[in-house]
Amino acid sequence: MTAETNRALALMIFDRAFNHGDTSVIDERLPTSGTDHQEAQGTDMRAHLKEVVRMLRTAFPDLHFEIHDALSEGEIVALHSTMTGTHLAPFRGMPPTGRKIEVRHMHFLRWQDGQNTDLWHLWDMPGLMRQLGNSPQAVT
């Protein structure tokens, strides 16, 4: 697979799964032995990612990931994105606020033979909590 093919696959997964809620793409493009490096060793990456999509799309029904940058070299695709949505259902024990959110993300995905085998992911969770009104204000 070429770097450009890997980049296109990564963008397709974000669009289908996160932006449209089609989690079948996860079964199509993640192997059963994939690794999400932010989760405990042995976590079922497919099941976990489907749950993340379901949880986010439930809490933020208008969920959308805008990909600002998508860089690919060899097996690795790096993405810089912004997640937006409106908090209309419970999220991590918080009742709906009706607030709009905008959260930056960074993703690194390893691709082998058209399959996303590894995921590294960072997102601005403190910023999200502040936007939802569930975080103490910074002391200055």
Image: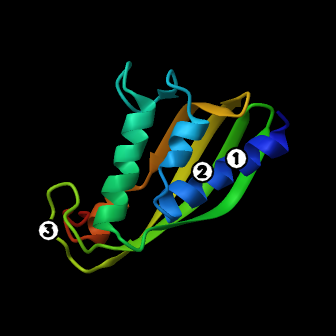
Q: Are marks 2 and 3 in contact (CB under 8 Å)?
A: no
Q: Amino acid at mark 3?
A: Pro
Q: Amino acid at mark 2?
A: Ile
What distance separates the C-alpha of mark 1 from that of mark 2?
6 Å
Neighbours of disc 2 within 10 Å: few (<14), some (14-19), many (20+): many
Q: Which mark is residue 9?
A: 1
Q: Which label was assigned to residue 50?
A: none
At 62% across and 55% down in the image, what residue appears?
A: 80
Provide residue 94's location: percent of width, then percent of height.
Answer: 15, 63
Disc 1 crowd, CA 10 A, few/some/many (<14, 14-19, 20+): some
Q: Specify the quadrant that holds the C terminus.
A: bottom left
Task: Answer with left or right where residue 128 lies relative to residue 21.
Answer: left
Instruction: Indicate left or right for 119 with 94 as reference.
Output: right
Residue receiving disc 3: 95
- Which mark is on residue 13? 2
Based on the displayed image, in which of its 4 quarters is residue 133 positioned?
A: bottom left
Q: Is residue 77 left or right of residue 131?
A: right
Q: Which residue type carries mark 1?
A: Leu
Give the mark, 2 or 3, whose residue is nearer the N terminus: 2
Q: CA distance from mark 2 to mark 3?
A: 29 Å
How many C-alpha atoms fall within 10 Å of the one at disc 3: few (<14), some, or many (≥20)?
A: few
**Disc 1 vs disc 2: Cβ atoms closer than 8 Å?**
yes
Q: CA distance from mark 3 to mark 1?
A: 35 Å
Say whether disc 3 or disc 1 marks the residue closer to the N-terminus. Answer: 1
